[in-house]
Amino acid sequence: MRLVIAISRAASLDATYTTVHIAMAALERGHPVRFVEPWDFEVDPAGRLIARAHALDAPPADREVLVRLLASRRAARRYVEFTQGDVLLLRLNPMDAGVLACAQIARQRGVVVHNDPGTLLLTGHKGYIAALDDVPRPRTLVTRSHTTALLFARELKDGVVIKPARASGGRGASLVHSPRQQQRIESGFEEARRHGDGYVVVQAYLPGAEVGEKRLVWLDGELLGGYLRRRAPGEFRHNLHQGGTPAPCEILAEDRALVDRITPFLLRDGVWLAGLDVIDGRIVEVNTHNPGGVHFGDMLGGTHMARTIVQRMESEVPGGGA
């Protein structure tokens, strides 16, 4: 098996990223890994899909060394022609439309692609979780209308979280504690619009957020593990990029029941790997573009999720990934 990982930028990787954990696990299991940036894809005059890649054939000393090799551009550079037996892992956020097109071409030529390009278009929008009526979630509205947002917010006595429908990391998100704070709702709405595609999510604030938010790692129908994210003092967002801190968590029976509720929808819609954000027994977000959670989940929970993910890839290619 050859693993090709499409990333936003080689210099932006961190040793704690799930992407790096997966790459290291693949290398340790004897699989060459190729990192490809959005501008490196080509369709040549013969109609072949190729890419100029950062190439690693053996595991470096540790993940820090791997990241330094990529950031300094000291890894070997080689051309990759996408063929059957390869696995293409899409780990970009925001997603690049050109990469999606190339990934679809690769898929048509027998390459295993995760997550599927069409799936990313569907699930990468927060309207996806809002439309899953049979899955426990906060009351949620997705709209471009200020008026509709104001009317909806008035119904929610605990306040609302307002965020872009297509963004991540807590960017453009705000909390309005009272439905009577019309001006703050309107300014939060405008802030969210600036960070996304124009659609805005207005979601009921869950009081259990004070305890924290669980990130659960889901793989092809299976819950692998997770951890708890606690927000920084004075902050309502739990994202680590916003000062949140990781903590161990117990995977409860109610977590597994919640995963059982959403799994049929994820499988139906072609999701292979996802990060599920859970507060108060409800799924707040489904993350499919480049879901994280492996580093802290493994470190705090004693799991080996990256190795499991690679083993699952091996089962999908001819010859079992040999």
Image (cartoon, grey):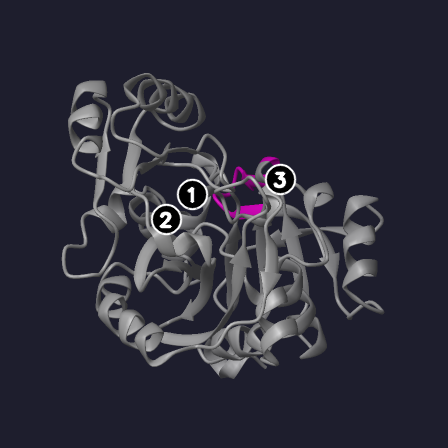
The residue depicted at 37 percent of the width and 58 percent of the height is 279
**Residue 243 image position (x, y, % from top left):** 62, 45
42 is within the stretch colored magenta = yes
**Which amino acid type corresponds to the residue marked 3 in the rendered image?**
Asp
As helix, strand or loop, the secondary structure at mark 3 comes to helix
**Residue 238 image position (x, y, % from top left):** 51, 49
- Vertical placement of residue 267 versus 245, above or below: below
Q: For residue 100, which numbered disc appears in the image?
A: 1
As helix, strand or loop, the secondary structure at mark 2 comes to helix
Q: Is residue 316 toward the left or the right of residue 78 in the image?
A: left
**Which amino acid type corresponds to the residue marked 1 in the rendered image?**
Leu
Between residue 29 and residue 246, name the one nearer to us.
Answer: 246
Q: How crowded is mark 3: few (under 14 residues within 10 Å), some or many (20 or more)?
A: some
Q: Is residue 189 toward the left or the right of residue 17 in the image?
A: left
As helix, strand or loop, the secondary structure at mark 1 comes to helix
288 is within the stretch colored magenta = no
| Distance in Å between CA atoms under marks 3 and 1 | 13 Å
- Vertical placement of residue 31 versus 91, above or below: below
Q: How crowded is mark 1: few (under 14 residues within 10 Å), some or many (20 or more)?
A: some
Q: For residue 192, which numbered disc appears in the image?
A: none
Q: Quadrant of the C terminus?
A: bottom right
Q: Disc 3 vs disc 1: which is toward the camera?
A: 1
**Residue 54 image position (x, y, % from top left):** 72, 51
- Residue 320 appears anywhere in the view: yes
Q: Mark 3 points at which residue?
A: 40
Q: Quadrant of the N terminus?
A: bottom right
